[in-house]
Amino acid sequence: MNAQQSPDATPHTGVPRLTITQDNEFFFAAAREGRLEIQRCTECETLRHPPSPSCPHCRSMKWDTVESARRCTLHSYTVLHHPKDPAFDYPLAVGLVDLEEGTRLVADIAGIDHADLEFGMELEVGFAEHAHGEVLPQLRRRGDGEPR
Ligand SMILES: [Zn+2]
């Protein structure tokens, strides 16, 4: 056994481990249960993602979360070819989506031919296991089976 061998499922990945804080723990805990939770300011009800300590609109530190229906449309995307990391398959499509609830999310896109990607197309947020076993959002064609 190589003493340098990583215990990760994907050795030699350059993908950093998640940094879990008191402000984003809810998001990753919900993802592990197949739910997309979005942070909401309880003063002005503005949604925000990624999670942060204070509201960018009114500066309030008070927040709760709402569960997203996971329906979204593709706002923009890119297809990565380099640099390659063993944690992903290339070419790798990454999308920025507008969630129906009114905020945005970035995630990789799975199961769609890159030539078929179009701005405004309807997608849904599912979940998939990533480099270190963490469960993160993944974009899929809407109706491609229930995310777990
Ligand atoms: Zn606010």
Image (tube, rainbow, N blue to C red):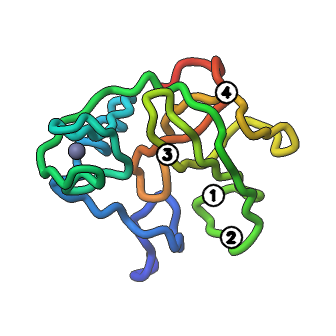
Instruction: Classify 26 as above or below 16.
Output: above
Judging by the rendered image, the residue that carries numbered circle 2 is 84
Q: Secondary structure at mark 4?
A: strand
x, y percentage for residue 21?
20, 58
Measured Cα–Cα span from mark 1 to mark 3: 19 Å
Q: Which mark is first along the chain, 3 or 1?
A: 1
Q: CA distance from mark 1 to mark 4?
A: 23 Å
Residue tagged by mark 3? 105
| Residue located at (50% from left, 27% from top) | 100
Question: Which label's residue is closer to the chain start, 1 or 4?
Answer: 1
Q: Say above or below: 72 vs 96.
A: above
Q: Is residue 134 left or right of residue 71?
A: left
For label 3, the SS is strand
The answer to the question of whether label 1 and label 3 lie on touching residues, with beta carbons closer than 8 A, is no
Density class for disc 2 (Cα within 10 Å; few <14, some 14-19, many ≥20) is some
Q: Which residue extends farthest right?
A: 115
Binning the other alpha carbons within 10 Å of mark 4 as few (below 14), some (14 to 19) or many (20 upward) gives some
View quadrant of ligand 1: top left
Residue type for callout 2: Lys
Where the N terminus falls, by quadrant?
Answer: bottom left
Q: Are marks 2 and 1 in contact (CB under 8 Å)?
A: yes
Say which element carries label 2: loop
Name the residue located 29 percent from the left edge and 63 percent from the top edge. Answer: 19
Q: Which amino acid, mark 1?
A: Phe
Q: Marks 2/1: CA distance?
A: 8 Å
Say which residue label 4 marks: 122
x and y percentages locating residue 78 in the rendered image? 72, 56
